[in-house]
Image (cartoon, rainbow, N blue to C red):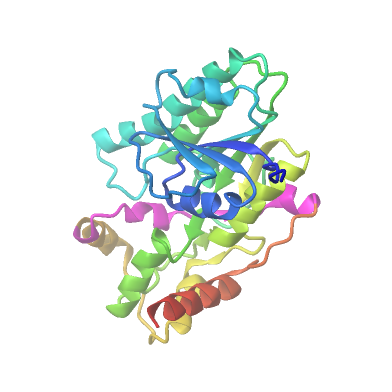
């Protein structure tokens, strides 16, 4: 009996992170998955998944896996929620730029590289922009995150790779019941402190984890290239977002936290809350223009679904 051929061979760097875990779960049934990890973790014993050790800096045995593969997805990067000390800022930058340069160098040496390379980036590229609508054609912003994203994407395009279609996926806050910002906000809501951060009108860009996974899979079957924003079509204000969050979790109104108290709570929570103080009204113009469909296009649909999923998992 002839076994069913795998659809694609997909190499994923950073496959054990929040996005990577969800992506692997969605892809593994019909594809051969090779995960590049800084420490062999074997969190999934599925026969379609293999793990290779790499340090994100030097080429090793893993480089040979890229030859004749179909897709390379790089999701490597230290969380930006870590306190922005001088040391952590450097780690945040290095954890993005170094693996990207390493992969680019490896691909440039191959005779048969993957046809598609999807590399992580972030909407931090645009900086703090108030109420301005931002799409993929918008200019680079200012600040630490903008600088990191600029270096990240420059590393992505450093090497000439004529056989490889490249997509820089600029992700926003990813909402998932498996970890990240949503779980922190959920915990704050339980303590009745999930209020708006500051009194200034700020816009949140975000995306449901299921839509982000679908977007990555859609990119594989499309012909888009360049930067693509991984965000919902309908960004909303921080006040509206937090109001919908409390409503989805059946929590009462909480007054806004004054701006001057944010550093104090950031210290208490050991979390870089200054990220949440940025205003980014980012829209996924390229995805929408090319026919991508969002299952959770706004805060209400996304938050209600996550709250339902969280409750169901507890039963």
What residue is rendered at 34% in x and 50% in y? 81
Residue 219, x across and y down, in percent:
70, 44
The residue stretch that appears in magenta: 268-290
Identify which residue, 166 or 82, lies in the foreground.
166
Q: In what quadrant of the picture does the C terminus appear?
A: bottom left
Q: Nearer the viewer, residue 110 or 99?
A: 110
Q: Is residue 174 magenta?
A: no
Q: From the viewer's perspective, is residue 7 above or below residue 264? A: above
| Nearer the observer, 143 or 18 | 18
Residue 120, how many percent across, how many down?
Answer: 53, 39
**In-front residue for pair 313/158:** 313
- Compared to 114, does 112 lie above or below? above
Q: Could one spot residue 237 in this view of the protein?
A: yes
User: Tag count in the figure?
Assistant: 0
Residue 217 percent across, percent down from the top left:
66, 49
Residue 264 left/right relative to 226: left
Image-quadrant location for residue 297 = bottom right
Asked if residue 191 is positioned above or below residue 171 in the image, the reply reads below
Q: Is residue 248 left or right of residue 292?
A: left
Q: Is residue 235 left or right of residue 102?
A: right
- Where residue 290 appears, x then y in whole percent? 80, 49
Q: Residue at x 59, y 40 (%)?
A: 32
Residue 286 inside the magenta-drawn segment: yes
Residue, x 67% and y 39% (percent of image)? 8
Whether residue 132 is visible, yes or no, is: no
Left or right of 71 on screen, residue 58: left
């Amino acid at each position: 009996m002839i076994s069913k051929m795998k659809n694609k061979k997909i190499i994923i760097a950073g496959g054990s992170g929040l996005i990577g875990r969800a992506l692997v779960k969605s892809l593994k049934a019909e594809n051969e998955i090779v995960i590049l990890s800084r420490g062999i973790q074997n969190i999934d014993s599925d026969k379609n998944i293999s793990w290779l050790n790499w340090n994100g800096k030097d080429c090793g045995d893993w480089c040979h896996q890229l030859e004749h593969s179909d897709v390379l997805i790089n999701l490597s990067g230290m969380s930006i929620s870590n306190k922005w000390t001088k040391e952590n800022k450097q780690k945040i930058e290095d954890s993005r730029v170094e693996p990207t340069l390493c992969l680019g160098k490896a691909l440039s040496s191959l005779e048969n590289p993957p046809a598609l390379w999807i590399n992580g980036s972030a909407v931090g590229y645009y900086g703090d922009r108030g109420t301005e609508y931002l799409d993929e054609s918008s200019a680079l912003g200012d600040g630490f995150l903008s600088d990191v994203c600029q270096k990240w994407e420059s590393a992505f395009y450093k090497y000439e790779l004529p056989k490889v279609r490249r997509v820089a996926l600029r992700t926003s806050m990813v909402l998932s019941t498996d970890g990240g910002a949503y779980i922190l906000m959920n915990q704050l809501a339980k303590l009745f402190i999930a209020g708006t951060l500051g009194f200034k009108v700020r816009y949140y860009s975000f995306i449901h984890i299921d839509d982000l996974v679908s977007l990555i899979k859609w990119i594989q079957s499309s012909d888009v290239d360049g930067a693509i924003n991984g965000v919902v079509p309908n960004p909303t204000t921080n006040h509206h977002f937090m109001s919908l969050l409390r409503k989805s979790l059946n929590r009462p109104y909480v007054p806004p936290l004054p701006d001057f108290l944010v550093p104090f709570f950031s210290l208490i929570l050991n979390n870089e809350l200054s990220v949440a103080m940025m205003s980014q009204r980012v829209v996924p113009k390229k995805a929408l223009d090319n026919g991508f469909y969002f299952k959770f296009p706004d805060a209400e649909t996304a938050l209600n679904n996550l709250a339902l999923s969280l409750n169901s998992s507890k039963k």
